[in-house]
Image (spheres, rainbow, N blue to C red):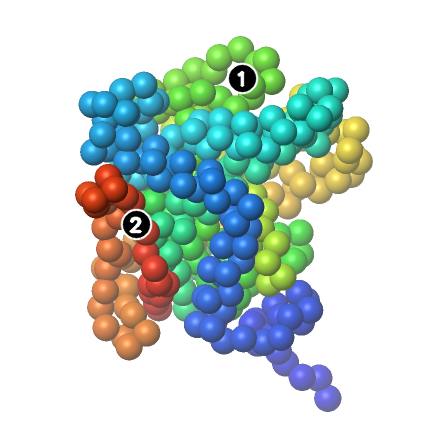
C-alpha cells in the first residue's frame, strides 16, 4: 500500500533530514545563516559601522561613502565586495598571485559577497514568513519589476519547507530576498567597461540594481538563487524568462564551459525560469497581502521598522534583532 507523504516529509526525506515542524525549522534557518556568516564576523562588524556612517555620521565619517537607497538597502553592495576581497581574496592572492586567473576565484569574488550581503542584512531583522501551502498563481508575476523593490525590511526570509520550492529537483527549505544595489557593476572588477545607469526613478545612480534570492537547504547549504533586474521595464515574469535565456550567453562570456558541460549550461537556462517563478511568486504574494499578516497566535501584525543606530557611551551602535519574528500568511 502506497503511503502518501506531506510536502514537509518529502522535503526531509530528499534532504536526508529528520522531520521538523515548520515553526521549529525557523530556529534552524537562523542557525544556518549564523554558521555561514561566522567566519566573516569582522566584515559583519564593519558593515554595521558603514551603515552608521551613512546615516547618523554622514557629515563626518560618511562623506566618502557611495550612496544607496537607505530605506530598502542595508548597505551598498560594493562595501561588501571590497571588504570580502580584502579579507579573503586578498589573502589568497598574497599566497599565490597566479590565482587571479583562476575561474573559481573569480566566481568566489562575485558570488560569495552577494550571499553574505543578503545574510548580513537579514541577520539584522531576523524575520521569517510562512505562506500557507497553496498553489500560487504565476499571474502574480505580471507586475512590474520595480514593484518588488520596496521590501518592508532590508531582507525577507521565507520558511519554504511546506511550499514545494525546488532548485535542480532539490527541495529548498528557506529563501532570503534582498536588494543588491551597487554604483559599480561587479564585472568591472574583471576589466569590463562601465555599465549604464539602472537606478529606479528617484534613487541615486546604480549600474547594478537587483533583487537577489538566497536559497537555504535542509543540510544548511546556502547558495545564490535567481535574481530580478529591478530596472527592467517589462513584467517580473518576462524578466525571469529573459534571465533564463541569458544564462547560456553569460556562461559563454565567462568561459564557464571550461568547468561546466554544454548540457549543464542548457539545463541551467531551461530550468531557471520555472524555478524562479515559484520563488518570486512567494514574495509577490506577500507584498500584495501585507495587511493580512498574523503571528503564531493568529493576531494581526506588521513588520517592524528597520533598526536605527543607537547612541551609547562608546559611540553609535547598530543593534539588530535578538530573536526571530515569525509571520504567517494564509
Please give the name of the residue rendered at 46% of the width and 38% of the height, measured from the top-left corner: 43
The residue under label 2 is 319
Asked where in the image residue 251 lies, by quadrant, the reply is: top right
**Does 277 sit left or right of 128 as displayed?**
right
The quadrant in which residue 266 appears is top right
The answer, for residue 139, to whether it is visible in the render is: no
- Give coordinates of residue 199: x percent, y percent: 35, 24
Looking at the image, tell me whether mark 2 or mark 1 is earlier in sequence order.
Answer: 1
Residue at x 21%, y 44% (from the top left corner) = 313
What is the CA distance from the residue labelled 2 to the residue labelled 1? 33 Å
Q: Is residue 290 above or below residue 224?
A: below
| The quadrant where residue 221 appears | bottom right
For numbered disc 2, what is the local secondary structure?
Answer: loop
Relative to 56, say whether 98 is above or below: above
The residue to which callout 1 is attached is 188
* Residue at the top extreme of this rendering: 193
Q: Mark 2 and mark 1 in contact? Answer it, CB < 8 Å.
A: no
How far from the left and from the top, in percent, is residue 102?
Answer: 73, 25
Residue count near mark 2 (Cα–Cα under 10 Å), binned few <14, some 14–19, many ≥20: few
Instruction: Give the total of numbered labels.
Output: 2
Describe the element under mark 1 as helix, strand or loop: helix
Mark 2 vs mark 1, foreground winner is 2
Task: Determine crowd level at label 1: few under 14, some 14-19, many 20+ residues with C-alpha closer than 10 A.
Answer: few
**Where the N terminus falls, by quadrant?**
bottom right
Whether residue 77 is visible, yes or no, is yes
Q: Position of residue 144 (x, y in %)?
A: 36, 37
Q: Residue at x 54, y 55 (%)?
A: 35
Between 105 and 260, the residue placed more toward the observer is 105
The one nearer the camera, 253 or 65, is 65
* Residue 4: percent from left, percent from top: 63, 81
Rendered position, 102 above or below 301: above
Amino acid at each position: 500500500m502506497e503511503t502518501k507523504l506531506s510536502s514537509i516529509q518529502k522535503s526531509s526525506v530528499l534532504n536526508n533530514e529528520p522531520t521538523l515542524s515548520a515553526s521549529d525549522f525557523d530556529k534552524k534557518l537562523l542557525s544556518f545563516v549564523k554558521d555561514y556568516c561566522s567566519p566573516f564576523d569582522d566584515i559583519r562588524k564593519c558593515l554595521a559601522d558603514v551603515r552608521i556612517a551613512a546615516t547618523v555620521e554622514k557629515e563626518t565619517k560618511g562623506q566618502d561613502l557611495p550612496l544607496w537607497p537607505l530605506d530598502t538597502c542595508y548597505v551598498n553592495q560594493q562595501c561588501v565586495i571590497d571588504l570580502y576581497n580584502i579579507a579573503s581574496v586578498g589573502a589568497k592572492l598574497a599566497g599565490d598571485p597566479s590565482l587571479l586567473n583562476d575561474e573559481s576565484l573569480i566566481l568566489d569574488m562575485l558570488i560569495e559577497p552577494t550571499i553574505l550581503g543578503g545574510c548580513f542584512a537579514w541577520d539584522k531583522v531576523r524575520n521569517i514568513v510562512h505562506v500557507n501551502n497553496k498553489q500560487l498563481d504565476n499571474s502574480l508575476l505580471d507586475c512590474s519589476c520595480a514593484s518588488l523593490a520596496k521590501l518592508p525590511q532590508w531582507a525577507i526570509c521565507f520558511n519554504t519547507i511546506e511550499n514545494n520550492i525546488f532548485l535542480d529537483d532539490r527541495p529548498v527549505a528557506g529563501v532570503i530576498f534582498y536588494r543588491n544595489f551597487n554604483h559599480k557593476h561587479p564585472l568591472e572588477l574583471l576589466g569590463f567597461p562601465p555599465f549604464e545607469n539602472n537606478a529606479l526613478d528617484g534613487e541615486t545612480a546604480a549600474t547594478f540594481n537587483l533583487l537577489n534570492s538566497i536559497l537555504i537547504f535542509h543540510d544548511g547549504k546556502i547558495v545564490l538563487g535567481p535574481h530580478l533586474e529591478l530596472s527592467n521595464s517589462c513584467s517580473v515574469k518576462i524578466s525571469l524568462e529573459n534571465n533564463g535565456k541569458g544564462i547560456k550567453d553569460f556562461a559563454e562570456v565567462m568561459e564557464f564551459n571550461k568547468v561546466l558541460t554544454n548540457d549543464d549550461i542548457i539545463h541551467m537556462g531551461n530550468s531557471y525560469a520555472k524555478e524562479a517563478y515559484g520563488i518570486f511568486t512567494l514574495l509577490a504574494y506577500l507584498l500584495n497581502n501585507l495587511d493580512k499578516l498574523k503571528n503564531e497566535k493568529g493576531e494581526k501584525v506588521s513588520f517592524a521598522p528597520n533598526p536605527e543606530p543607537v547612541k551609547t557611551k562608546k559611540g553609535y551602535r547598530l543593534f539588530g534583532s535578538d530573536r526571530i519574528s515569525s509571520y504567517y500568511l494564509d
